[in-house]
Structures are given as structure tokens and as C-alpha cells.
Image (spheres, rainbow, N blue to C red):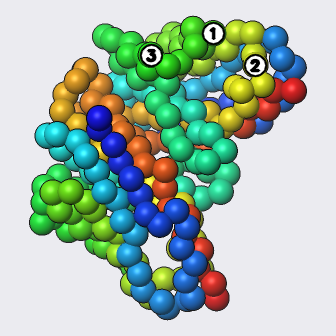
Amino acid sequence: EDQVTQSPEALRLQEGESSSLNCSYTVSGLRGLFWYRQDPGKGPEFLFTLYSAGEEKEKERLKATLTKKESFLHITAPKPEDSATYLCAVQGPKMDSNYQLIWGAGTKLIIKP
Amino acid sequence: DTAVSQTPKYLVTQMGNDKSIKCEQNLGHDTMYWYKQDSKKFLKIMFSYNNKELIINETVPNRFSPKSPDKAHLNLHINSLELGDSAVYFCASSQVAKNIQYFGAGTRLSVL
């Protein structure tokens, strides 16, 4: 069964303390892996798409990497405004015309000043 | 201009009532979605729809029905509301080829 697992469920860091979030997946024929950020009371906001093992994407203090079994979201010198829930989703083989995403449960990141 | 907008933002209602949530996207996307997010923040796909095909998650009760008057709108109608329907419902849209989904701000439904 296709599955996405994110860890840890929650992560508390001091401002400036770098760390990584993990997204492991079991899906045959990965077509894409997506990272989203969700702030309280809002909808998920797209961050990155990764398509093949070895690929990396960066945006400000965030860097996403991909292997054949997992993705990491590295956060360098985070600030309090980086506090949010980070969601991972994968797109499997074309099972229907809409390429539905399989979502993880998210990691809640809290950055203390 | 908000790309994906849904109304209302909050909806409080009694068990057994029928309610609708509206969604509109101005991105020109060809596919729209409805998700349910439970208290543990897990996003569950309910429906995906483009102008050709409606895909229904088989676990969604048939009390839920999507209605699309045109390509830019996908409304969610819920009959005979139950306590377990309380959740946040998100609308999203994408171009199917890229599948980067853009989400609305959510509708928090509370069934009393």
C-alpha cells in the first residue's frame, strides 16, 4: 500500500538551531514529491517539488532533498516565523486522470526566540 | 486577488441539517479538489474533479456530493450532517500536468 510517513510529529528548536524533517514514502513509480507549509487557520502553501533521487531545491532557510525512499527538509538557522506545520505529499503512478497525492500527517515545527 | 477562495470560513450547524460550502478558483486550473482535515491535521482527499471526470474517494459517505457549475467552481454539498463531519474542509486546484495544488483558507465545520 502506498504510504507517506513524516517524522518527528513535532519539533521544538531554539532560534538559529538547524535541523531536518523527514518524509519517508513507499510508492512504486514516484512521479513527484511535494513539500507544503501550513500555518494555523490557513490552507497548505506550496514550497517545493522534487522529481528524482539526488535532486535538491532551496528557498531562503529551507532546503529539500530526495532519495529513492525519503526526503529531508533541512532548516538552517531558523527564525520564529518558520514555525508552522510542514506537510509532505507524493504523486504516484497515473492511477486515474487526476494524479492524486498521498499525504503525510505533517511535522509541527516550533521555533523559540 | 485570492487564487482559491472558499466560503464560509466558519459553519456551525445542527445534526441532520443540509449545508453547502462554495469554492472558486481564478487560476485557470483544470482540476479541483475537496479535502477533509481532521483534528490530527491529516489531509484526506474526498474528491477530485476536472471537466471530464469525477474521482470519488470510496470512503466518503454518499451524503457528500460535489457540484461543479463551471470549470472555476466546485461546491461541496453535505446532507444529513453528523457529529463526525466536524472538521476543516479545504478546497484546492491544480493544473493536472504539474499537480502543484493551491489551497483555499479552509472552512471549519462544527456540527452540534
Q: In the image shown, does A89 or B30 lie closer to the viewer?
A: A89
Q: Which chain carries label 1?
A: B
- Are discs 2 and 1 less than 8 Å apart at CB? yes
Outermost residue toward the bottom in this view: A16
Q: Is residue A2 above or below residue A89?
A: above
Picture residue at 34% right of the left edge, 25% below the top: B30
Residue A89 visible in rendering: no
Which residue in the protein does label 3 denote? Answer: B58
Q: Distance between the residues labelled 2 and 1?
A: 10 Å
The amino acid beneath tag 2 is Glu
Determine which residue is flagged by label 2. Answer: B82
The answer to which quarter of the image holds residue A70 is bottom left
Task: Please indicate, yes or no, whether residue A103 appears anywhere in the rendered image.
Answer: yes
Residue B12 percent location from the top left of the image: 84, 29
- The residue at 55%/88% (across/down) is A15
How dense is the environment of label 1, judged by Cα within 10 Å: few (below 14), some, or many (20 and up)?
Answer: few
Query: Considering only vertical position in the picture, is B73 above or below B87?
Result: above
Task: Give me the chain letter of mark 3.
Answer: B
Q: Is mark 3 on a helix, strand or loop?
A: loop
In the rendered image, the quadrant that contains the N terminus of chain A is: top left
Q: What element carries label 1?
A: loop
Instruction: Tell me: B61 left or right of A49.
Output: right
**How far from the left and from the top, in percent, is residue B83?**
78, 25
Spatial separation of the CA atoms under disc 2 and disc 3: 18 Å
Dot 3 alpha-carbon crowd within 10 angstroms: few under 14, some 14 to 19, many 20 or more: few
Of the image marks 2 and 3, the number of the one nearer the N terminus: 3
| Distance between the alpha carbons at the discs numbered 3 and 1 | 12 Å
- According to the picture, the residue beneath numbered tag 1 turns out to be B63
